[in-house]
C-alpha cells in the first residue's frame, strides 16, 4: 500500500480526536482499517494452517515409517512421546510467532492512522 | 484409602475455596466488579485463573481414564484441549476483548444490532453451560464414591453448595483468585504423585517396563474419522465456551488478552503432561481398573496402589483435593458466566438478580446430574465441545471476521448446528454406546460445517439486513486501543 501523508499545521488548535474515532469517520481511515483486518485474518489463517499441517503430519509420520511408533526412548514408546509431549512446544511457538506478527501489524496501523492526523 | 483421608482433603479444598471467596468479597463492590472484575486483573493472575477454570473433571480424571481405556487415541483429547486455545488466540482473543461486551450474547447483540440474535445466543450459552456442569457433578459423585464410600449424591451436592456460596458472596473478582489458586493446586496434585511414583518405581526398573500397545478391554482403535471429528470439536469448541470467553473481558486491553492466552497455553501444556503420565502408568500397573468400569478413577486410585503406607495416603489425599478443585473451579466459572447471561437477559442486570441467577444456574444441572448416569467423563465433555463448536463458534468467527453476517444468518446457523448436534447427542443417548454409529457418536465433523454453511448462505440471501453499524463495529473490534490504555 502507498503511504499517504496529509500534512496540516501542527500549531493550530487541533481537535483532540482519538485515533479510533478518527478512523471510523473518514473513508481513508476505513481503507487502513480494512487493510489491518485483512492482514490479521491472513496471519491467523497462515498460523492455523501451519499448525494443523504439523499436527496432521504426526500420525502420517507414525504410519509411514514402520517401527517408529514402537521405538522406545527411556522406556516410553515414541508415539506416546510425540503426541503426549511433542505437540505442546509446537503450539507455544505458533502462538508466540502469531502474537509478534499481530502486534507488528497493529503498530503499522497505528503509525498510518497517526501520521494522517 | 481410608475414608477419613478423602473427607479431610475434600473439606480442606472446600474451606480454602470459601475463604478466598470471602476475601474477594471485601474488594468487590460495584456491579462491574461482580461481572468482570472491573477488567483490571493482571495477565499472570488471569492466565492462572483461566487455566484453573478450564481444567475440568474431564482433564483431571477423564483424560487419564480414557488413556487407560484406549491408549494413544485418547492423547488427541489433551492435544485438542490445548490447541483449542491456539485457535482462540488466533481468531477471537483480542477482537472479543476490544468489543467491550460483558458476555457472548452482549457481543452478538452489539455486532448484529439485533435483540433476537441475543436471545438465541443466550439460549445456546445456557444449554452449553448446563451440559458442561453435569459431567463436573458426575466427577464429584465418582470421587466421593471411590474415596469415601459415601453415597454419590453427596459429592454433586457439596460442589453445588460451595460454588453457590462463593459466587453469591464475591462475584467474578473473588472467583478470579479462587480459580488462580486452583490451577496451581491441580498442577501440584498431579505432579507430586507422578514424581513420587516414578522415583519409587525407578528402583523397580520401571523404564524397562513396557506400555502394552493393546487396549486392556480389547477396544478397537479409533479410525481417522473419529480422530478428525474429535479434533474439530475440541479446536472449535474452545472458541465458544462461555466460561472461557468471559475471562477475556477481565484483561485491560486486546494486547494483554493475547499475552494472557499465550501464558495459558504454557500452563496447559505443562499440566497435560501429568494426566498423560497417569494414564500411561495406569496402563502398565493397573490395567484391571478398565475391566471394573473404574477407568475414570485411575488418577484417584493409582497413588494408593503403587505406594504403601502413609506416603500413599497423603498422595491420595492430594489427588482427591486436586480433583475437587477441578470440579469446583470449572463449575463456579460456568455458574458465573451463566448467571451473567441469565441475570442480564431475564432479571435486569442487578447484583441481586446476579445472585438469584447463580442459584438457578447451579440447581438445574444438579437435577440433570441426578437423573443421568456418568459416561466416560472425557467423552461427555467432548460432546459438549461439539455442541459449542456447532452453535457459538460459527457466530463468533463469522461475526468477528466477515462483514456479510446478518441476524437472520446467525440465527439460522445456530439453530441448524444446535438441532443437528443436539439431535446426535440425544440419539447417542437413546441408542447406547454400543448401538451408536461412529458418525453419530462424534458428530462435529459434519454439524460444524453445516452450521457454517447455513449461516453463510442465509446471510448471503438476506444481505440487505447487514447492520448499518457494521463499519463502526468492525473498526472497534480490530483496531488497537488508544496508546494511553496500553501503556498502563
Image (cartoon, grey):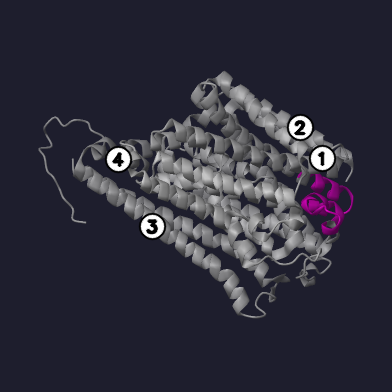
Q: Which residue is mark 2?
A: B158
Residue appearing at x 76%, y 60% in the figure: B69
Residue appearing at x 56%, y 58% in the figure: B445
> Badges 2 and 1: C-beta atoms under 8 Å apart?
yes
Q: Quick check: do tags 3 and 4 share a chain?
A: no
User: Of callouts 2 and 1, which one flags the residue occurring earlier in the amino acid sequence?
Assistant: 1
What is the number of callouts on the image?
4
Q: Quick check: do tags 2 and 1 share a chain?
A: yes
Q: Which residue is mark 3?
A: A43
Q: Which residue is mark 1?
A: B144
- Is B331 situated left or right of B207 in this image? left
Q: Badge 2, how many Cα within 10 Å: few under 14, some, many 20+?
A: many
Q: Is residue A21 above or below residue B323?
A: above
Range covered by the magenta-colored residues: B290-318
Q: Badge 1, how many Cα within 10 Å: few under 14, some, many 20+?
A: many
**At numbered mark 2, what does the secondary structure look like: helix, strand or loop?**
helix
Q: Nearer the viewer, mark 3 or mark 4?
A: 4
Which mark identifies residue B471? 4
**At numbered mark 3, what does the secondary structure look like: helix, strand or loop?**
helix
Q: Main secondary structure of the magenta part?
A: helix
- Is B93 situated left or right of B6 in this image? left
Q: CA distance from mark 1 to mark 4?
A: 54 Å
Residue appearing at x 76%, y 41% in the figure: B372
**At numbered mark 4, what does the secondary structure look like: helix, strand or loop?**
helix
Which x, y percent locates residue B426? 67, 46
Amino acid at each position: 500500500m502507498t503511504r499517504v501523508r496529509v500534512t496540516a499545521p501542527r500549531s493550530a488548535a487541533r481537535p483532540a480526536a482519538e485515533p479510533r474515532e478518527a478512523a471510523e469517520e473518514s473513508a481513508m481511515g476505513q481503507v487502513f482499517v480494512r487493510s489491518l483486518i485483512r492482514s490479521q485474518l491472513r496471519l491467523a489463517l497462515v498460523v492455523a494452517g501451519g499448525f494443523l499441517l504439523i499436527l496432521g503430519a504426526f500420525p502420517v509420520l507414525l504410519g509411514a515409517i514402520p517401527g517408529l511408533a514402537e521405538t522406545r526412548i527411556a522406556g516410553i514408546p515414541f508415539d506416546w512421546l510425540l503426541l503426549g509431549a511433542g505437540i505442546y512446544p509446537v503450539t507455544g511457538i505458533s502462538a508466540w510467532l502469531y502474537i509478534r506478527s499481530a502486534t507488528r501489524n497493529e503498530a503499522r496501523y497505528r503509525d498510518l492512522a497517526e501520521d494522517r492526523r | 484409602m481410608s475414608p477419613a483421608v478423602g473427607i479431610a482433603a475434600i473439606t480442606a479444598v472446600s474451606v480454602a475455596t470459601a475463604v478466598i471467596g470471602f476475601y474477594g468479597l471485601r474488594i468487590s463492590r460495584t456491579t462491574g466488579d461482580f461481572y468482570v472484575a472491573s477488567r483490571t486483573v493482571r495477565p499472570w493472575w488471569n492466565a492462572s485463573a483461566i487455566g484453573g477454570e478450564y481444567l475440568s473433571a474431564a482433564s483431571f480424571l477423564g483424560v487419564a481414564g480414557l488413556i487407560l481405556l484406549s491408549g494413544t487415541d485418547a492423547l488427541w483429547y489433551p492435544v485438542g484441549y490445548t490447541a483449542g486455545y491456539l485457535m482462540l488466540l488466533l481468531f477471537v482473543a483480542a477482537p472479543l476483548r476490544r468489543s467491550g461486551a460483558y458476555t457472548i450474547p452482549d457481543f452478538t447483540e452489539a455486532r448484529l444490532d439485533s435483540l433476537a440474535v441475543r436471545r438465541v445466543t443466550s439460549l445456546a450459552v445456557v444449554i452449553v453451560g448446563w451440559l458442561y456442569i453435569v459431567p463436573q457433578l458426575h466427577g464429584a459423585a465418582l470421587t466421593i464414591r471411590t474415596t469415601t464410600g459415601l453415597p454419590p449424591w453427596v459429592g454433586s451436592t457439596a460442589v453445588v453448595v460451595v460454588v453457590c456460596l462463593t459466587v453469591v458472596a464475591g462475584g467474578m473478582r473473588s472467583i478470579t483468585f479462587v480459580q488462580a489458586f486452583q490451577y496451581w493446586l491441580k498442577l501440584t496434585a498431579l505432579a507430586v504423585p507422578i514424581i513420587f511414583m516414578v522415583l519409587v518405581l525407578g528402583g523397580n526398573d520401571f523404564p524397562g517396563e513396557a506400555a502394552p500397545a493393546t487396549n486392556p478391554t480389547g477396544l478397537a482403535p479409533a479410525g481417522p474419522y473419529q480422530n478428525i471429528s474429535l479434533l474439530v470439536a475440541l479446536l472449535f469448541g474452545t472458541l465458544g465456551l462461555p466460561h472461557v470467553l468471559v475471562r477475556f473481558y477481565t484483561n485491560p486491553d486486546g494486547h494483554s488478552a493475547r499475552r494472557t492466552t499465550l501464558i495459558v497455553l504454557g500452563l496447559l501444556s505443562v499440566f497435560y503432561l501429568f494426566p498423560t503420565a497417569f494414564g500411561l502408568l495406569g496402563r502398565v500397573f493397573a490395567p484391571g481398573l478398565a475391566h471394573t468400569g473404574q477407568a475414570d478413577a485411575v488418577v484417584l486410585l493409582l497413588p494408593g496402589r503403587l505406594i504403601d503406607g502413609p506416603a500413599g495416603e497423603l498422595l491420595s489425599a492430594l489427588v482427591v483435593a486436586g480433583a475437587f478443585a477441578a470440579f469446583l473451579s470449572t463449575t463456579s466459572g460456568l455458574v458465573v458466566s451463566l448467571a451473567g447471561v441469565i441475570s442480564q437477559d431475564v432479571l435486569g442486570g442487578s447484583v441481586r438478580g446476579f445472585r438469584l441467577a447463580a442459584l438457578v444456574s447451579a440447581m438445574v444441572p444438579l437435577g440433570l446430574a441426578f437423573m443421568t448416569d456418568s459416561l466416560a467423563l472425557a467423552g461427555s465433555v467432548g460432546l459438549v465441545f461439539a455442541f459449542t463448536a456447532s452453535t457459538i463458534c460459527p457466530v463468533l468467527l463469522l461475526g468477528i471476521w466477515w462483514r456479510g453476517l446478518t441476524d437472520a444468518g446467525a440465527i439460522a446457523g445456530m439453530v441448524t448446528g444446535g438441532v443437528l448436534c443436539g439431535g446426535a447427542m440425544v440419539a447417542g443417548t437413546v441408542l447406547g454406546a454400543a448401538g451408536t454409529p461412529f458418525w453419530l457418536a462424534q458428530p462435529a465433523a459434519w454439524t460444524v460445517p453445516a452450521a457454517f454453511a447455513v449461516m453463510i448462505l442465509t446471510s448471503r440471501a438476506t444481505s440487505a439486513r447487514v447492520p448499518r453499524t457494521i463499519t463502526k463495529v468492525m473498526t472497534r473490534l480490530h483496531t488497537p486501543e488508544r496508546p494511553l490504555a496500553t501503556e498502563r
